[in-house]
Image (tube, rainbow, N blue to C red):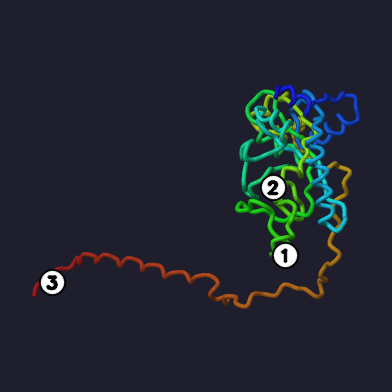
Amino acid sequence: MAAFVDLLLSQRVPLLRSSDGFKELETLFCQTMRGFDIVKIERIQNKPLWDFFQFQKTQMKNSNNGRNVTEKLLFHGTDSKYVDVICYTNFDWRVCGVNGTVFGEGSYFARDAKYSHSYTGVSDVKSMFISRVLVGSYTKGHSSYRRPPSKDSGDINFFDSCVDDVTDPSIFVVFEKHQIYPEYLLQYKTTHPLVSMYGAAAVPAPKPVLAPKPAPRPAPQPTAPSASVSPPSPPSYRPSTSSYRATPPFYQPSPRFAQPSPSPSPPPPSPKPKKNDTCAIA
């Protein structure tokens, strides 16, 4: 009986692929995801959850001096075993598990589907909620927060949610579940074989094929000048003979020293003494 009541409270209506709603959600999903195929997108119809959401929106508007409350369409990835309980009773991080508490203990939602993909489990067909979230006024989160901090250090005026970066938030943490309405359930599967290895939107792009470089041409060989080339013209400056004459060297040997003096000829040999034909007796 309880299961029958739950079916009446929460229903899922498939969106036609040709509908504008399907195409808009597909575009939002594919902005940060590639290599995946959307199996189906279902719109969740749960009137009690919708009524709580609208009541919370009115309360936040009244607390904001009647000004409109910031509302965003955000992603939340989860294991497929938690899909039914979320559709019936909404998000509750104490029941559906904790995916992280870096910015506080609450339900985490992401601007980019790529971030939420990391928490979808290991099943072949993965599940991701696209929810309406009343983020309102927000501030930087902290792991110690169990609710948003006070705006003025008092006990009445609090922020509505926490974020990762106030100037450009991509992660939102909500501590009150009635600020959330799980509007769509998107189920998808991997189509690219490398997605499981590299993760969402990280499949390496194919490298462009470069054309082969042309072979270097041989350098041209120098050729002999043709006979028709005129000889180089003489220099424009020629010294005059009157202004330039060769001068004799500073030193010239005297003519008498020009040639060595002849050496004296050896004296003729003395004649041998002749024998005396006379005989003298002393």
Name the residue nearer the viewer: 130 or 250.
130
Instruction: Check the image and report above or below for 266 versus 53.
Output: below
At x 77%, y 23%, the residue is: 39
Residue 10 percent coordinates (x, y): 77, 28
Q: Residue 175 carries which label?
A: 2
Residue 56 percent coordinates (x, y): 79, 46
Residue 31 percent coordinates (x, y): 80, 37
Name the residue nearer the viewer: 127 or 242.
127
As measured in the structure, the alpha-carbon distance from the residue carrying label 2 to the one carrying label 1 is 19 Å
Asked whether the viewer can see residue 124, the reply is: yes
At x 87%, y 52%, the residue is: 68
Is there CB contact under 8 Å for labels 2 and 1?
Answer: no
Q: Which mark is residue 226?
A: none
Asked whether the viewer can see residue 224, the reply is: no
Q: In which quarter of the image is residue 48?
A: top right
Element marked by disc 3: loop
The disc, 1 or 3, on the residue closer to the chain's N-terminal end is: 1
Callout 3 amino acid: Ala
As measured in the structure, the alpha-carbon distance from the residue carrying label 1 to the one carrying label 3 is 175 Å
Q: In which quarter of the image is residue 225?
A: top right
Q: Mark 1 points at which residue?
A: 152
Element marked by disc 1: loop
The disc, 2 or 1, on the residue closer to the chain's N-terminal end is: 1
At x 77%, y 36%, the residue is: 182
Residue 118 percent coordinates (x, y): 66, 36
As measured in the structure, the alpha-carbon distance from the residue carrying label 2 to the one carrying label 3 is 176 Å
Q: Nearer the viewer, mark 1 or mark 3?
A: 1
Q: Mark 3 points at which residue?
A: 280
